Image: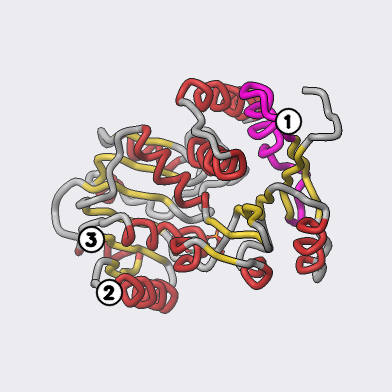
């Protein structure tokens, strides 16, 4: 792709941004789909987020992704915010409109699309969710909004999980999230569940760590989905498989959060064939560096 007078710019704002794989996702898509767009990392110094968003709009940037630590703080600089992103209270994608940026949370829409692509349902499902931090809280919203029957949310710290459950249940108007301590998984009714691992436990280099080490927990899982993608197969995934369940890592979530952002910026639908090509590129990166 030749950069010329008509090239549109998108980028990632965050601190740090050096390790991002988003330029690979977006620049490969632009090349394959023939869009005159480039995507670059944009390091933003602490306390300069507002200036950065105003400046990006003034410079006619088409869109931005937002990463740590600015996903909540950026909301104050938006012109408009998507319904789900507003509920979650975190935005990772900014789309240019006539008079400012509109914010979306494609992390959660990306997780949903990743699950759908693997035939994993949320609607009507009984789910176990590990964690109650920023990521797990967003997943709780996603499950509630997408019609899960019940979500047993398990966390080490009781106060935190209770607060999240109360907040989500209130926001969606039904008692869908059941807060529990990790050890209370034994009280979850017998049956097989979709389990989503939403903590940072097991992330490289601590690959032998797992939130719940008891084998009995894994007997309850028909499908395990870990938001982590490094290592390629976490201890949670290994234990799920050892007990007869299917297990997936978070790489497709990373893939689809990028694809959905790209679709919003360029008003296109990315085909599954193109998604697969990007996925293979991402996968090669991870399996090589694992
Ligand atoms: P993130 O933004 O990635 O969700 P976070 O907000 O710091 O990160 O949340 C981390 C999550 O991992 C929390 O649910 C945390 O449990 P607590 O609420 O009890 O702190 C969980 N977590 C981190 N280390 C853990 C460990 N060693 N055992 C169990 N849970 C752990």
Q: Which residue was labeled with disc 2?
A: 173
CA distance for labels 2 and 1: 44 Å
Tell which circle, 2 or 1, labels the residue nearer the N-terminal end.
1
CA distance for labels 3 and 1: 45 Å
Tell which circle, 3 or 1, labels the residue nearer the N-terminal end.
1
Q: Is residue 229 visible?
A: no
Residue 66 in the magenta stretch? The answer is no
Name the residue rendered at 24%, 72% in the picture: 174
Left or right of 129? Residue 272 is right
Q: Secondary structure at mark 2?
A: loop
Position of 223 relative to 153 (above/below): above
Whole-percent x and y of residue 204?
A: 60, 43
Residue 139: assigned label:
none
Q: Residues within 10 Å of mark 1 (few under 14, many from 20)?
A: some
Region rendered in magenta: 14-37
Residue 150: assigned label:
3
Name the residue rendered at 85%, 34% in the picture: 5
Whole-percent x and y of residue 251?
A: 52, 36
Give the quadrant of the N terminus. Answer: top right
Judged by depth in the image, the label closer to the viewer, 3 or 2, is 2
Q: Which residue was labeled with disc 1?
A: 36
Front residue of 235 and 253: 253
Q: Secondary structure at mark 1?
A: loop
Instruction: Say if disc 2 is inside 8 Å of ligand 1.
Output: no
Residue 31 in the magenta stretch? The answer is yes
Whole-percent x and y of residue 98?
A: 66, 58
CA distance for labels 3 and 2: 13 Å
Q: Residues within 10 Å of mark 2 (few under 14, many from 20)?
A: few
């Amino acid at each position: 792709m030749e950069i010329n007078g008509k090239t549109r710019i998108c980028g990632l704002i965050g601190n740090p941004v050096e390790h991002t794989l988003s330029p690979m996702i977006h620049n490969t898509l632009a090349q394959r789909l023939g869009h005159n767009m480039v995507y670059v990392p944009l390091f933003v110094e602490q306390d300069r987020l507002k200036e950065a968003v105003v400046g990006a709009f003034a410079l006619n940037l088409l869109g931005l992704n937002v990463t740590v630590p600015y996903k909540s703080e950026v909301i104050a600089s938006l012109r408009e915010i998507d319904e789900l992103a507003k509920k979650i209270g975190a935005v990772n994608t900014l789309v240019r409109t006539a008079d400012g940026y509109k914010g979306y949370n494609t992390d959660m829409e990306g997780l949903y699309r990743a699950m759908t692509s693997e035939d994993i349902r949320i609607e009507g499902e009984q789910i176990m969710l590990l964690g109650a931090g920023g990521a797990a809280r967003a997943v709780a919203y996603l499950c509630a909004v997408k019609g899960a029957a019940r979500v047993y949310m398990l966390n080490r710290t009781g106060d935190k999980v209770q607060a999240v459950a109360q907040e989500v249940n209130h926001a969606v108007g039904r008692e869908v999230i059941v807060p529990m301590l990790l050890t209370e998984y034994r009280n979850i009714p017998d049956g097989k569940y979709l389990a989503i691992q939403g903590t940072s436990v097991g992330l490289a280099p601590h690959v032998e760590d797992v939130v719940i080490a008891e084998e009995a927990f894994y007997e309850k899982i028909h499908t395990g989905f870990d938001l982590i993608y490094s290592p390629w197969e976490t201890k949670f995934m290994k234990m799920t498989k050892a007990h007869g369940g299917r297990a997936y890592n978070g790489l497709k979530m990373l893939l689809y959060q990028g694809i959905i952002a790209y679709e919003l910026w360029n008003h296109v639908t990315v085909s599954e064939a193109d998604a697969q090509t990007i996925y293979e590129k991402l996968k090669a990166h991870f399996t090589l560096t694992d």
